[in-house]
Amino acid sequence: MEQTLAVNKIETSTNLFSEFKILESPKYGFLDKNDERFLIAIPWIGAALTVGLWLVAKVGYAFQITDLPVLLSTLLFLDSVHILFTFTLMLSSPELRAWNAAPGARAKTGWMKGLSPWARTFVIAIALGIVIYLLKAAPYVSTLKGMATMWLFLELLGPAHHTLAQMRGISLVYNSTLKKNIEFSASEKTQALRCEKLERLFFNLLLAGEIFYWIPTIFGMDKLEVPGMDTIRFVGGILAVGSATALVVNSLYFPHQEKSRKFAFIFRVLLFPLKMLSIVGGIFVRAAHGTEYLIIFRKMAKSSNMPKPKKKHLFMMTIGVSLAYLIPYVLTWPNVVKDVIGYSVSDSIFAAAIVGTFTLRFTHYYLDAVMFKMSDPTTRLAVSPLLASNQS
């Protein structure tokens, strides 16, 4: 009898704490075990550091993070160069080259109707380069009305939407992996659909919270006495905290989620409200995004039918173009360049670096949105096997 009670006690304890064994091997997953551990560990470390340093600052040990550690973190965690991975993968993967040439991948509506993904990307890149030059490099445009709206898109809406969309996309792959490997009952299918609808809603609310909270800072209104700014920030903060928490809780209700690491992965959304406490939270949002892309890039490259020599060539090419891209990227941090090596970046070099890096950055947003648009049958047929394959 005592032995039975002891066993029951152990089982109960295991069930209570199983959600938090984030590095335990799941039954169903779509990533390499070590890759997934790395992917999941970064945000948990970031959350702990953000809260810890915030508490230290609260008791009087204030600290200031300059541009240099922020720049170094973008380099270390690949947030700076991951934008190139999409392009090199598109050029190398036979599956993605076939997808680009497929009639079904061509735009079906709009002013770019009939153009392939690569052709549309080229058009978008040219348009973005012109717009970014006018907004960021041409001094005579900086006082035009409407500048604030474009700055909002360039500095907040674009990156925040892209980062959250990537997180949601990976979360959906966790869902589809479970549905592929487990026979859901009718009630479980209904519950899964409800969870995914709520997930979409909460991600949209989190994006709205991000925009509302950071609008005053981006526009410089936090230094001015503009009526209503405190209310806007408060609403944004409530939205961000509430929706991020709801996403974490909602993930626990997805059927059979305990057989994957979905909960441990979705925890990263809490970094968004943690940005309000410290810049460290923002650094780890970027770190999480860059490492996510690295792991997905590795997954798709390894799952591709490319021969091994060509895979090696892909990785070498990616390293090469990334190193080349780092030169203009670092030049967009003129204060760091001046402090570290004593070189003053001229206005013309700075403008060229800004136009080049921002054009690539936003072109990458567009190409990713096209390449991972799983609602399109042609795209889903080409890309899904690269994410779902268990090849190593």
Image: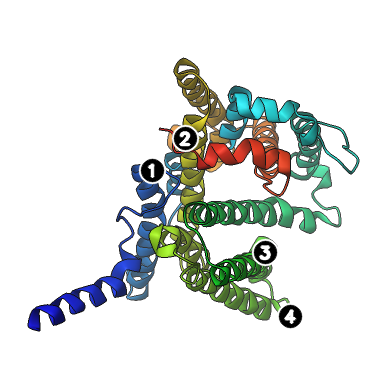
- Say if mark 2 contacts mark 1, CB within 8 Å: yes
Q: Nearer the viewer, mark 1 or mark 3?
A: 1
User: What is the crowding at mark 2: few (fewer than 14 residues within 10 Å), some, or many (at least 20)?
Assistant: some
Q: Are marks 4 and 1 in contact (CB under 8 Å)?
A: no
Q: Is residue 6 left or right of residue 116?
A: left
Closer to the chain start, of discs 4 and 3, is 3
Look at mark 3 in the image and give the residue it sits on: 220
Q: Callout 3: 10 Å neighbours few (<14), some, many (20+)?
A: few
Measured in 3D between alpha carbons, the distance from the residue under mark 2 to the one under mark 3, in whole angstroms, is: 40 Å
Label whose residue precedes the other's in the sequence (2 or 3)? 3
The image position of residue 234, as x and y in percent, is 61, 79
Q: Is residue 271 left or right of residue 211?
A: left
Q: Residue furthest top?
A: 309
Name the secondary structure under disc 3.
loop
Kindly identify which numbered label has been placed on residue 160. none
Mark 4 lies on a secondary structure that is loop
| Residue 120 appears in the rendering | no
Q: Position of residue 116 (x, y in %)?
A: 79, 31
Kindly identify which residue carries mark 2: 298
Residue in view at x 62 percent, y 28 percent: 95
Q: Nearer the viewer, mark 4 or mark 2?
A: 2
Say what secondary structure mark 2 lies in: helix
Q: What residue did someone put label 1 on?
A: 35
> x%, y% of residue 181?
47, 52
Count of labels in the image: 4
Q: In 3D space, how far apart are the residues under numbered discs 1 and 3 (Cα atoms)?
A: 40 Å
Q: Amino acid at mark 1?
A: Asp
Please tell me in which quadrant of the rendered image residue 146 appears: bottom right
Q: Is residue 81 above or below residue 161?
A: above
Residue depicted at 42% across the width and 50% down the height: 29
